[in-house]
Amino acid sequence: MDAQTCIDRWKALQRRLEAAGVDGIVLNGGADLEYLTGYHAMPLERLTALFARTTDDKPTLLLPELEKARVTHLADAFDLMTWTELQNPVARGLEVLGDAKTISFSNDIWGTHVLSLTRLAPAAKLLTISESIGGVRAVKSPADCEALQTVGGLADQVMTMVQTGEIPLVGRTESDIATDISEHLLRVGHEKVMFVIVASGPNSASPHHHPGDRVVEADEMVLFDFGGTHKGFNSDTTRCVFTGPIPDDVQAAYDALMDAQQKAVDAASVGNRIADVDIAARSTLDAAGYGEAFVHRTGHGIGLTVHEEPYVTEANETAIVAGHAFSIEPGIYLDGKWGMRLEDIVVIGSDGTAIRCNNTNRNLLQVG
């Protein structure tokens, strides 16, 4: 990552923090840290974190002395500070924060470091990043949105193979099919496969089913949900196929599912809240009689990680803005029978409306 990208990302984050009334920030090693510095920290018990006041021209990267040699120090983008085994790293970082009155910290920081913050800065108000600004990476740049469309298109290539029967289903185990899908994801350009769900027959009623040794049979539902990374950004898409003539009750449910997803996509626009997207999908399935069978949120943010802010629930009052990126994936699950889900990633464009990153056929197709 070049220094100017880091500088631009810090400036954009500063504006959001200042608007939220936050004057100090502590970002634990992870995707947020990598996003702002380009440094991928080792997941150790030793604290590596970004400390900064929101008025600072540059944030400060605090890390263990023994890790210093691993850092490509972009001096124009961030300062470097180390701590030794005989020092308290949080106390060292608070030298940067000074008398900050409201400090926001990473959701996934170790509890021991939060307790240190509480003891060492007792007068400060402590907030998680979610509570203060709804996630460091929740608002994407135009380049980030383009990257999500690119990786979404790669996943679409593999989903098309499923929908056209190029990847055989009937008579094969879920795990064998999942292996094929993983190989194709890499072949079309993903650098890493993050997950592959192949759920057949009654297994499709388990939203996060792990592919096993069940053999796909004729005349049943098969649900596919998979994704991987390309240049750091993640894909994630879900489609269902039926291995025989589609029964009327299954088709009726799927028609309601498609309607729910479309209404949710329509609601994903500037001027609405994230909650409105969930409500649009949920109320549609409620009206069709499938509300109790929709057992999860409508979606999740996506970017450098598969799941990140913003989370698409009816409790999320966050206003939708250009640059938001999230999945829209309503589902219907009938235990012991079948399940179905339809998922696309959307990014909110500069015109304030949702752009789909996945564009394969959304119908329930007969395959096999």
Image (cartoon, rainbow, N blue to C red):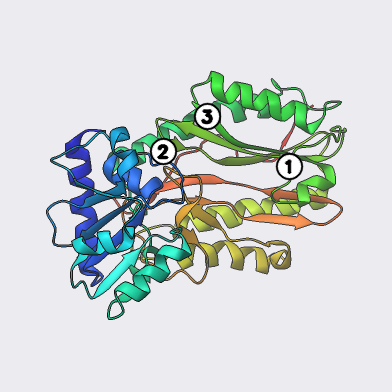
Q: Earlier in the sequence, mark 1 or mark 2?
A: 2
Measured along the vertical axis of the image, is residue 99 above or below residue 85? below
- The residue beneath circle 3 is 192
The answer to whether residue 109 is visible is: yes
Residue 93: where, in percent of width, then height? 26, 59
In terms of secondary structure, where does tag 3 sit?
strand
Left or right: 148 as drawn, with respect to 155: left
Quadrant for residue 217, please give it: top right
Residue shown at the point (14%, 58%) measured from the top left = 56
In terms of secondary structure, where does tag 1 sit?
loop
* Amino acid residing under circle 3: Lys
- Which mark is drawn over residue 210? 1
Quadrant for residue 54, please give it: bottom left
- Which mark is drawn over residue 148? 2
The answer to whether residue 131 is visible is: no
Residue shown at the point (37%, 63%) measured from the top left = 129
